Image (spheres, rainbow, N blue to C red):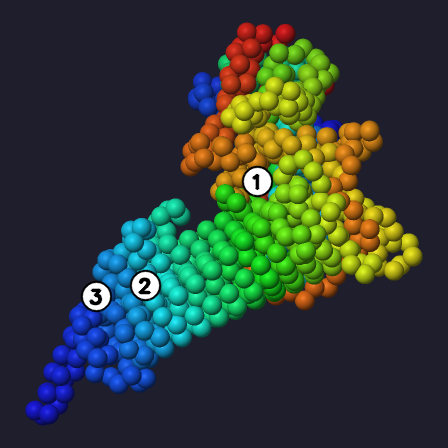
Amino acid sequence: MRAILAIVISGGLALVAGAAPRAVSELAALIDAAPAGTTVVVPPGEYHGRLRIDKPIVLDGEGRATIDGGGEGDVIEIACAGVTVRGLRIRGTGKDVSSEPAAIRALAGETTIEDNQIDDALFGVDLREAPNSVVRRNTIRGKDLEPGRRGDGVRLWWSHGCVVEDNRVDRTRDLVFWYSEDLTVARNHVTGSRYGLHFMYSHSTEIVGNELTGNSVGVYLMYSNRIRLTGNVMTNNRGASGYGIGLKDCDDITLEGNALLANRVGLYIDNSPSSVDSAGVIVRNLIAFNEIGFLATPNTHDNRISGNAFVENEEQAATNGRGDLARNTFSADGAGNFWSDYAGFDLDGDGRGDLAYEPRSLFSSLMATQPNLRLFVHSPAQQAVEFTARALPELRPSPMFTDPAPLARRPALDLPTGTSERSAWPMATLGAALVGGAAMVCLALTRDGRLHVGERRIA
Amino acid sequence: MSAVPQTVAIESNPRRRSYAGGALAFARREFRDAMSSRWFLLYTMAFSALAVAVSFMSLSGAGSQGFAGFGRTTAGLLNLIMLIVPLMALIAGAGTIAGERERGTLLYLLAQPVSRTQVILGKYLGLALALVCSLCIGFGVSAGALAWRAGGVGLGSYATLVGMTCALALAMLAVGTLVSAMSRRTGVATGVALFVWLALVFLSDLGLMAGSILFKLRVQEVFGLGALNPLQAFKMSVIVSMNASLDVLGPAGVYASQAFGEGLPWLLGSVIGAWTIVPLAVAVGAFARRGSV
């Protein structure tokens, strides 16, 4: 009996101890006691305070421990190489952008940060000169701040050879990569942020299978060369810039098998490639349902654009400013791109249109030099302008570019599936409600034959 | 259909009827007349067929990615709506008073124990209800097609589109009613309504485009003048509801989003509201003055 009582009391004490927040110094003591290279399992519970790790250990919360920084500065700082932080819930960084407080800041390489859940953080994971590190399967959510005052979900600074994969990031500024080379950035899912993936002076990287939805820009590469983007999905990136993919002064970029859907601009190219002897390769992408499929500065040249499907973009291709895209190649080995608005035909059945695809929309060319006219897109007046240009050929502008061998059928692109399908029932219900409501009103008002005032008409 | 027995049912106890009740009786009469006329059936069928066709065309090829381009569908529907709906509403409104003046039936109506304001407001209300029913049937059928082909994408935007289209129809009906109240003959009223349609759909926008280029108008001027057109206000409010911003409309749209922010939908809605209330008020005044002549 006494033994049972003792067990109950100690169990209750343990529960109380587990629920009440403890000081991080308890954790620091555990780490001090552990030999280098061992695993420290954090006892379940909530810890308050800021932690500094300066010994190569594995710190494992097993998903049951929380560290709350209390809204001041960084939460965890990793000061030596070879540290792993895993399975922790981390929250409560400071929020002053100028001091850049982070949930986890690594100042040395060979760091592994995985399976953590980071909330209420100005910066999520910040790697400073931390080469060969891994950031994997973390969930990162920023603070509820206006975009201009947020920090980066993940930031790499002079950290070569890192792997950033399978993270889910919501409502931060960017996942940004500064001066970092030979990276693998794969299968991350970024929503509600400014730039999903942002590369600055970071070369030789693979960007694979990421999903970037509802940001201002999906992927923005700046001054970064030799980057391959494959199998990424960019959906609904709108707002101030609103690009699925943006390239600024980048050389030797390869975009292959990406899906750019319903962005303001699918692919935006600003002066890329910028060097004389380099080229951009844009092949087998699906660029669909964007306001502008492909937008480029008029000086853009030396991109090979082939085997892509340009489907139902409001404007398939455009320049921002007077000029054309004629110095790019729109076909390779006799095969061009699929354009959903291609009006030609394929009589010889070789899968290529017999007439070249030459976009020469009068309204597009007007908008290139008179951006204010964009106010009138989606209106009958725009159609009237296009109709006039078709009727009076002398008004037609010269073609913006020529695709000599447009694909007659939409290519079967091996693309990742995008947004998951939603149930059709709400829409069907709305339809039924509209028809049913109208029918009921009609019936109710015309049912009985009595008119209360007057009559229909005098014969 | 038009061979309905011409019953005459005089109100049994006119003094009991309230002011609104009198107007509602006219609304009901107008609604029934609209329902039994062929043009109404024709418009409903044409609008439904076109809406379904546009939805299908916009969605062709969208399925393989599990992604439906609702934005594209809306863009297609927008163009259709901006052409057809004002035409429907203006012509329907143009016929309402002038037609009865021409036939002489208006004298009979005005002999009833109701005021002229009640008559014209009742007529407007009845036609408005008929138009909204017609649009709802078209949108309902189109929603069915969308659900079948694309799943439940963009439900909220679609509902907004339906609501804004009804608002646009009410505004254009008010303009049509005004034209009708000031015309003696249906032919004249219809002609004027057609010209108003042409002006709102094409001439004002094309003129503003030309003006913007010739006089190098600033963004705020282009936006302000553009948004005065109820059709453009309608288009912009649909786009705002879909994208939460007008950035797809270029610099003028970005300016509007930044300058008015959250208030932009209200601003655009009040433009359409003004296009409803002002013509209707003028029509009531004109009808009170002119009566059956």
* Secondary element type, mark 2: strand
Q: Residue B248 carries which label?
A: 1
Q: How far apart are marks 3 and 2 (CA)?
A: 12 Å
- At 68% across and 16% down in the image, what residue appears? B192
Residue B70 rendering spot, x and y as whole percentages: 61, 49
- Toward the left, the furthest residue is A2
Kind of residue at badge 2: Ala
* Secondary element type, mark 3: loop
- At 27% across and 56% down in the image, what residue appears? A94
Residue pointed to by mark 2: A103
Kind of residue at badge 1: Val
Residue pointed to by mark 3: A49
- At 31% across and 70% down in the image, what residue appears? A78
Q: Quadrant of residue B61?
A: bottom right
Q: Is any atom of residue A457 visible in this view?
A: no
Q: In this view, does A324 lie to the left or right of B208?
A: right
Q: Do the residues labelled 3 and 2 touch (CB within 8 Å)?
A: no
